[in-house]
Image (spheres, rainbow, N blue to C red):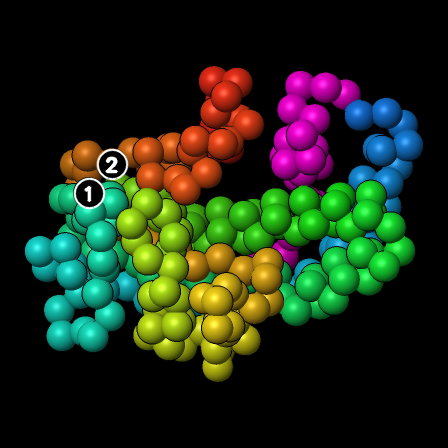
C-alpha cells in the first residue's frame, strides 16, 4: 500500500474560516459573505490536497533503530501507553501559497480570507488522512495530532522528520532555514495509536505555544471545538 494519498476538498468549512477570522459567534455582513464564498471557490481550484505518512513501532517512547528521536516531555506524555506512532505530513500545494501572494497584492481583505480558508483546508486534509490511516488499525485508539513545535517538541526537528517519511520527494514539502514548511499551508504531526490510551483523541490546549495569548481560550473555548 502506497503511503501517499490525495484528498479532495469538496467545500472548505466556512464557519471554521470565520472563527479563524475572529467572527466566532458573530454573523458576517453580506459583503463579507460574498467575498468568503468567492475566495473559497477560487481556492478550491488550486488546492491539491495530499498527505504522506509512515507508521513505526514505539518502544519506551522512541522509534527503534532510528536516528530521528521524539524529543521533549510533551510528546512523551502524549504518546504514553501507545504501541505505535504515526508520522504524517499533509499539504494543500504550492498553488495555494501563490494564490495568497496574489491576493496580498489585490487587497488585504481577500488575502486574509483566503489565508484563513487555506488554513482550514489543510486541517480538513489532516482530518481525512486520520480517518484513512485508522482504517488500517481496526480496534485501536488514537491520540490527537501533535504538531512539531507544540510544547517542548522542537520545531528544529522538521528537516529530519520530513526526510524520514520522504515528504520532500513524494509530496513536495520541504523546510527552510527557519524550520518553516514550504508550501506554507502544510502540516507535520505525530499521532499515537494503541489500546486503553490515557491521552484523548481530541486536541487540547496543554502543550500549545499559543495557549497564553489565544483568543479562543480567553473565551473559555478551544480551536478544537
> In the rendering, at what x and y percent does residue 188 appear?
43, 59
Examine the rendering and report whether any part of residue 135 can be seen. Answer: no
The numbered disc on residue 155 is none
The numbered disc on residue 77 is 1
Q: Quadrant of the N terminus?
A: bottom left
Tell me what residue is drawn at x 34 percent, y 66 percent.
Answer: 157
> In the rendering, at what x and y percent does residue 141 appear?
26, 42
Tell me what residue is drawn at x 82 percent, y 43 percent.
Answer: 109
Magenta-colored stretch includes residue 22: yes
Query: Outermost residue, left direction?
Result: 60
Foreground pick, 97 / 11? 97
> In the rendering, at what x and y percent does residue 136 appear?
32, 56
Which residue is the site of mark 2? 199
**Range shown magenta:** 4-27
With 199 as the anchor, is 201 left or right in this view? right
Label pair 1/2, CB-CB below 8 angstroms: yes
Vertical comparison of 45 with 175: above or below: above
Circle 1: is it few (<14), some (14-19), or many (20+) Cα within 10 Å? few
Amino acid at each position: 500500500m502506497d503511503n501517499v494519498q490525495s484528498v479532495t476538498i469538496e467545500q472548505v468549512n466556512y464557519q471554521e474560516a470565520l472563527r479563524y477570522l475572529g467572527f466566532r459567534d458573530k454573523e458576517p455582513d453580506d459583503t463579507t459573505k460574498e467575498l468568503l464564498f468567492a475566495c473559497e471557490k477560487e481556492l478550491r481550484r488550486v488546492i491539491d490536497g495530499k498527505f504522506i505518512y509512515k507508521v513505526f513501532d514505539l518502544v519506551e517512547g522512541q522509534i527503534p533503530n532510528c536516528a530521528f528521536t521524539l524529543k521533549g516531555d510533551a510528546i512523551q506524555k502524549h504518546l504514553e501507553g501507545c504501541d505505535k506512532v504515526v508520522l504524517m505530513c499533509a499539504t494543500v500545494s504550492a498553488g495555494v501559497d501563490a494564490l495568497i501572494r496574489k491576493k496580498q497584492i489585490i487587497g488585504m481583505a481577500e488575502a486574509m480570507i483566503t489565508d484563513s480558508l487555506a488554513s482550514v483546508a489543510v486541517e480538513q486534509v489532516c482530518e481525512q488522512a486520520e480517518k484513512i490511516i485508522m482504517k488500517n488499525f481496526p480496534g485501536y485508539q488514537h491520540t490527537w495530532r501533535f504538531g512539531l513545535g507544540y510544547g517542548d517538541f522542537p520545531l528544529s526537528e522538521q528537516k529530519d522528520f520530513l526526510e524520514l517519511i520522504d515528504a520532500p520527494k513524494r509530496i513536495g514539502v520541504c523546510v527552510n532555514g527557519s524550520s518553516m514548511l514550504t508550501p506554507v499551508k502544510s502540516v507535520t504531526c505525530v499521532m499515537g495509536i494503541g489500546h486503553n490510551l490515557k491521552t484523548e483523541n481530541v486536541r487540547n490546549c496543554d502543550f500549545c505555544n499559543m495557549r497564553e495569548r489565544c483568543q479562543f481560550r480567553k473565551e473559555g473555548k478551544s480551536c478544537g471545538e
